[in-house]
Amino acid sequence: MTVLLPFVLNAGLNFVLGLLIAYFLGPEEFGRYAIGAAIIVLVNTALLDWIRLSAVRFYSLQARETQPEIRATLDLLIAGVSLSLCALLAAAIAAGIDTRMPAMMLAAAVLAGIGAGLFDYHGAIARARFLDAAYARLIIVKNLLALVLMVGGAWLTRDPTVVLLGGLLSAAFAVISVRRQLADAPLALSAARRDLAWTFAKYALPIVAGNAIYSLIPLLNRSLMAGAHGFAEAGYFSLASDMGLRLFGTLGATLEIVLLRQVIRLDETRGRRAAQKRIASNLVIVLAVALPAAMGFWLALPAFDRLLVPPSFQGRFSAYMAPLLPGFLAITLFLAGLYPAFLIEKRTLVATLAAVVALVVNMAIVMLFAASPVVYALAQTAAFLVVLAVTAVAALRLLPVMPSLRDCGAILLAVILMSLAIWPLQGRLAALPELALQVALGALVYGAVILACDVARWRTLLLLWWAARKGRSR
């Protein structure tokens, strides 16, 4: 599928981007940059992401032809909220409000958050219209420019504000590059409808409230750690947190793109029950991808640390990444596997309540045990595991069938055998051959067990594909 290529590229470039920025900024300045990056995520998630979510749910090829007022309302909302945020930012700076951050850095972070929101919105429009080429262009332009502008800014200036501005420019140019392809018509105020805007808000704001809390947790942890243990320690923690959130966030978003569009299409063509059954079967696919990724990364962490992590972060990166990994796995399973159950039923309050509980758990652990820096990583993981537990119980009650227990058991068996195969390789070789051998051997063992057990009927589908290919070649 064409839409997967930019996501693979996106994951690789985001990994490289974070590591290079950390390399050139160093732990202390990277700690400051990481707080700005967390503000970007919070601004985007809390104030703009509800419009993207509404586009995903309500805008489609059919809606484009029969209900042009949907796109008009969405465009007006995204423009209005963005301009309002710019005005609020200017007023706050002019009033001299003390945010305990340099004014330029705060402005760069907020504007970059707006840019990220516009970028995500246009990505949702491209996906809704199945414009995979435009979507690929959007992703590629943004990531390549970010690599040049953000890493270049870190190298030349060692200033986190310049790096944040580089992120803003890369998102802005990416949106401009596809704006004409994605436009339905010139923005018309008269075509927008207030009742639609209210419908979008009622649908998406409960989800956004939960997501905003999820994004608030890393920001609070980084800020509190910087105050208690210094910006350098916050930088060590933030690099591991950023790398994990980018890797597993991209993994979850990739799975969502592939699987959610099928669920929505089934809901439109074959009814709600068929869509719910697909969600249950998709949970197996998400588990089959996310669980070995998390376990494999943990097993390969020593080699990864020695090979790819900037020297000033080595050792500390692994110390934080290891306790963070279960939380990254949990949030991936929630976003790609459980979230569609609430989305299709428009019952999103559960996710918000789970986020509130997660925030309370995170802050309780931090306040009680904050003497050790690693507690911040454990608190974040505990929060994300709470989200997974609460939403899993609620989502499975909504579905008419359970995910295949046989397939889930086979996935666990495959992960165990994969782990036994690559565990003895830790620390035995130089970093590069060790990491390469771990990835190759782990993939071979895991893939063999999955195919042998015919998880998600992948072996059957592979044999059918092979038979069809042989038939065409005759």
Image (cartoon, rainbow, N blue to C red):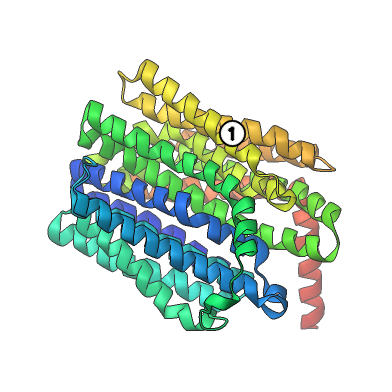
Comparing 170 with 342, the one in front is 342
Position in image of residue 327 (x %, y %): 51, 35
At 73% across and 61% down in the image, what residue appears? 264
Left or right: where does residue 15 sit relative to residue 156?
Answer: right
Above or below 356: residue 26: below
Position in image of residue 28 (x %, y %): 19, 41
* Badge 1 amino acid: Ala
Residue 395 location, quadrant:
top right
Quarter of the rendering occupied by the N terminus: bottom right
Position in image of residue 348 (x %, y %): 65, 44
At 85% across and 43% down in the image, what residue appears? 400
Above or below 89: residue 219: above
Q: How crowded is mark 1: few (under 14 residues within 10 Å), some or many (20 or more)?
A: many
The residue at which mark 1 appears reads as 354
Quarter of the rendering occupied by the C terminus: bottom right
At 80% across and 40% down in the image, what residue appears? 402
Q: Residue furthest left?
A: 157
Q: Which residue lies furthest to the top in this view?
A: 368
Residue 131 location, quadrant:
bottom right
